[in-house]
Amino acid sequence: MVLDQEYGMDELPLVANKLAEFVSSYHLFTFEGDLGAGKTTLVKAICDTLGVWDKVASPTYSLINQYQASKENRTFPVFHIDLYRLDSAEEAYHAGVEEIIQSNDLCLVEWPQRLPDLLDGRRIEVRLRVSASGGRRIQVYSHEN
Ligand code: ADP
Ligand code: MG
């Protein structure tokens, strides 16, 4: 486990910064947690940290949103994928999800459980849940394969 803490909205930028440190060595980040656990909020905060100016919102209907990050004179695409409404692996394939994940572009994926292949790749696994305090508990694991 590389991170385990509780955070409120005030600590969100700090948590996002810690996660963004992994962007140089990992391109796949998966976010698991119930509806309302704070996945999209955290993705948005990570995008802020990466210098994304586009509006970050859950790509619920399209499955995939693409943003442009610009940090330290470098620009790169960020793919935000939300598989909550995914019905089949075929649908993901047709939407181009596999292709994006196999590329080296940064992918931030909500509801990876919908596409089990996603759960055994090299990645940063983020797990979120509502904590008793009303904040959120984040647990992060790094996987080499
Ligand atoms: P998800 O994408 O997991 O369904 P959202 O990111 O949409 O969840 O967040 C749901 C709600 O939880 C939002 O109103 C958001 O402001 C709130 N929230 C997110 N993170 C925190 C936090 N650390 N502390 C308190 N509220 C939070
Ligand atoms: Mg969401």
Image (spheres, rainbow, N blue to C red):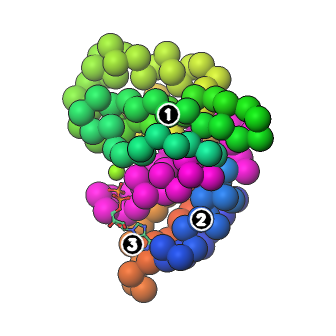
Q: Position of residue 132 (x, y in %)?
A: 40, 84
Q: Which residue is mark 2?
A: 13
Tag shown at residue 136:
none
Residue found farthest to the bottom: 133
Asked which secondary structure carries label 3, the reply is strand
Residue 43 visible? The answer is: yes
Q: Callout 1, which amino acid?
A: Tyr
Q: Which residue is mark 3?
A: 130
**Which label's residue is closer to the chain start, 2 or 1?**
2
Q: Position of residue 127 (x, y in %)?
A: 49, 57
Residue at mark 3 to residue at mark 1: CA–CA distance: 28 Å
Please tell me whether residue 44 belongs to the stretch shown in magenta: yes
Callout 3–callout 1 Cβ contact below 8 Å: no
Height in image: 17 above or below 112?
Answer: below
- Taking depth in this image into account, of 18 and 50 the one nearest to the observer is 50
Respond yes or no on whether mark 3 lies under 8 Å from ligand 1: yes
Residue 119 visible? The answer is: no
Which residue corresponds to the image point at 65% horizontal and 37% vertical from the top-left? Answer: 70
Tag shown at residue 67:
1
